[in-house]
Amino acid sequence: MPPWEQWLTVSQLNEQIRDLLEGAWPFVRLQGEISDLHQPASGHLYFTLMDAQSRLRAVVWRSTRHRLRVLPRAGESVRVTGRIAAYPPRGEYQLVVEGMQTGGAGAERQRFLQLFARLKEEGLFDERRKRALPLLPETIGVVTSASGAVIHDIVTVLDSRFPHYHLLLAHAKVQGEGAAEEIVAALHLLRADGRAQVILCARGGGATEDLAAFNSEAVVRAIAASPVPVISAVGHEVDVTLADLVADLRAPTPSAAAERLLPEKNQLQEKLQILRHRLRRALWSRLEQQRQAVHAVQQRLLHPRRRLEFLRIRCDDLLQRLCAAQHHGLQRQRQRLESLQDRLSVWAEGTAVALFRSRLTQNRERLQQAGRHYLERKQAIHSRLQTRLHGVSPLAVLQRGYAIVYNQRGQVVRSAEELPTGERLRIRLAQGELIAILLPQKENPCSDTLS
């Protein structure tokens, strides 16, 4: 039967392809760049060997690994020898590496390092230009694929933490040809809209070549030019891109970025309750301190009656001292006058009597004048003290038509709101006192509106 008339199963076709591949390339030498390197628990090494246009899966079995002179490292250019092996159950083929030698840094890695050094020198990765995220953003901009699982994860996390938000989705391819241009356009769209208070640039994990768009210079500069903070959540926790470095915050996953955007509502309410309790306690403590300070000042202040009594006692003391000084001065002058009179009586028959009499008359006049001046000065001082005493006396206020109202406990009344109906009041006037009883206030009969 001719081959074109035969019906083959998928397994039969894959087995024939395996025989062709393994028979045609039992030994091959390749040069390429290592990407997407990982090592499972089995001990085998899996990676992708790539150049500018194509990729090829490769594996180093655990039994071969210890014979290699160098071990594969992501981003390095290597030269490998091995064989092509196919796996019929999945219809895939891969390179089984038997030998490996290094070829230096790969072209893509070299380009990445050069771009990183240039942007770092410009200060785009400086920590001082990082901005803090808003506490509770009302509008959140998201740059990601509208058809991927990332946007679903972000919305799920945001709804579970604080549902009161508005989300603006700017769709963009996150890998492949044209992804960088679409990401830049999405960032410019959110910037022109102006409503977003924070922007989340996100995608799921993937191989290194899948994250190439987030290592492009255009995307890095668009993130740096954003007027609002930008969170980068690209790939998994082990993946770091230039977009992560220039963003205001890097999150390991899109879900973790959503958790950083909004706090949990219950935790925020508990924190507000704690702060409210602390504020109330601080206010009560402050009020108590002020109350104690006012009480201490009240204890130090003298009642006007006590101060008036003190000034009256001082005035009486000064008056007594003034009278004593006047009496003592007059007594001395009288004694001196008597002594002179005695001396004059001895010389009554002398020739100088007339002269001494004349001097005596002059001295008497001078003494009387000095006594009058002395009394006038003391009386003036006494008058000034009485005037000062009268100025601080509450009785002086009463003389101008005012009155002092006391309640039944003898306390001065300062507000009508303090008095209950039926309170017995004592009203002190400038002359005399009055007794009054506080009656309930009646409505004004003249308050009706006239038509």
Image (cartoon, rainbow, N blue to C red):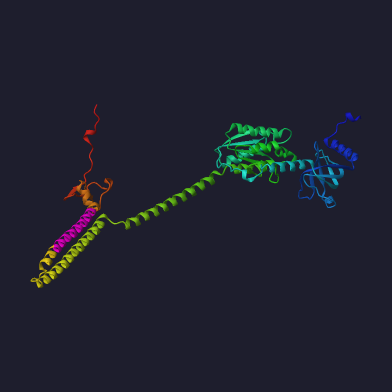
| Residue in the image at 22% along x and 33% along y | 446
Where the C terminus falls, by quadrant?
A: top left
Rendered image quadrant of residue 313: bottom left
The extreme bottom residue here reads: 346
Q: Range of the magenta residues?
A: 362-389
The extreme front residue here reads: 351
**Picture coordinates of residue 54, whole percent (x, y):** 81, 37
Q: How many marks?
A: 0
Q: Main secondary structure of the magenta part?
A: helix
Where the N terminus falls, by quadrant?
A: top right
Depth check: 61 or 405 in front?
Answer: 405
Depth check: 109 or 323 in front?
Answer: 323
**Picture coordinates of residue 156, whole percent (x, y):** 61, 39
Q: Is residue 246 above or below residue 146?
A: below
Relative to 238, 442 lies left or right: left
The extreme left residue here reads: 349
Relative to 2, 387 lies left or right: left
Q: Is residue 207 visible?
A: no
Q: Is residue 158 above or below residue 325?
A: above
Rendered image quadrant of residue 6: top right
Rendered image quadrant of residue 127: top right
Depth check: 371 or 120 in front?
Answer: 371
Depth check: 249 or 400 in front?
Answer: 400
Q: Is residue 298 above or below residue 272?
A: below
**Picture coordinates of residue 285, whole percent (x, y):** 42, 53
Q: Is residue 180 visible?
A: yes
Check if residue 374 falls in the magenta segment: yes
Check if residue 119 falls in the magenta segment: no
Relative to 134, 365 lies left or right: left
The extreme top residue here reads: 451
**Picture coordinates of residue 115, whole percent (x, y):** 73, 41
